[in-house]
Image (tube, rainbow, N blue to C red):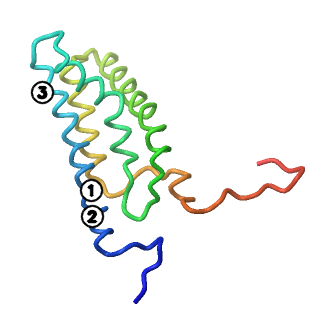
Amino acid sequence: MQLSRTQGSPAQGSRAQGSRAHIRVALAASGWVALAATALPGGWPLRWVPVLVFVALGPGLALLVPRPGGGSARLETVALAAPLSLALAVLTATSLFLLEAFSVALFLGALAAFTTAAAALPGGVPRPAARAHGTAPPEVPAGESR
């Protein structure tokens, strides 16, 4: 039996699936690490760097991490992760302020719980490049628009 270049070997498939699982576990843990980092003394880089990176990228990457069967579309994933994460952070912070319950611990806990749930789910947000991986965009006839 001969394998095509796009199919890969079964060993490569299991390695890719294992690496995706490690990425998803790391994303799920990142929020809880950021929450634990808030216990460190104020002003330490070990306190604010994990929080900043998690809030800016964690929830978005958890939603967009490549899933089995999807194309890699890494550039699109990175380009969408930060705006998506920041939008979720703004919605969470606004909700907590409106409920008059905002605290850093509650804010990070809510985002960490969301990120853990998103990383644990088998599905993901469909991305146009992931769906069209390996195909050229459809041509538009002259005189027509999309």
Label located before the other in sequence (3 or 1): 1
| CA separation in Å, label 1 and label 2 | 6 Å
Q: Amino acid at mark 1?
A: Ser
Q: Is residue 17 above or below residue 120?
A: below
Q: Is 103 in front, or is 53? A: 53
| CA separation in Å, label 3 and label 1 | 25 Å
Where on the picture, by quarter, is residue 40? top left
Q: Is residue 73 above or below residue 133?
A: above
Q: Which residue is mark 3?
A: 36
Mark 3, mark 2: which one is toward the viewer? 2
Q: Amino acid at mark 3?
A: Ala
Q: Residue furthest right?
A: 143
Where on the picture, by quarter, is residue 136? bottom right
Label located before the other in sequence (3 or 2): 2
User: Which mark is on residue 15?
Assistant: 2
Q: Are marks 1 and 2 in contact (CB under 8 Å)?
A: yes
Q: Which residue is mark 1?
A: 19
Q: Are marks 3 and 2 in contact (CB under 8 Å)?
A: no
**Could you say where residue 8 lies in the image, as x and y percent from the top left?**
39, 72
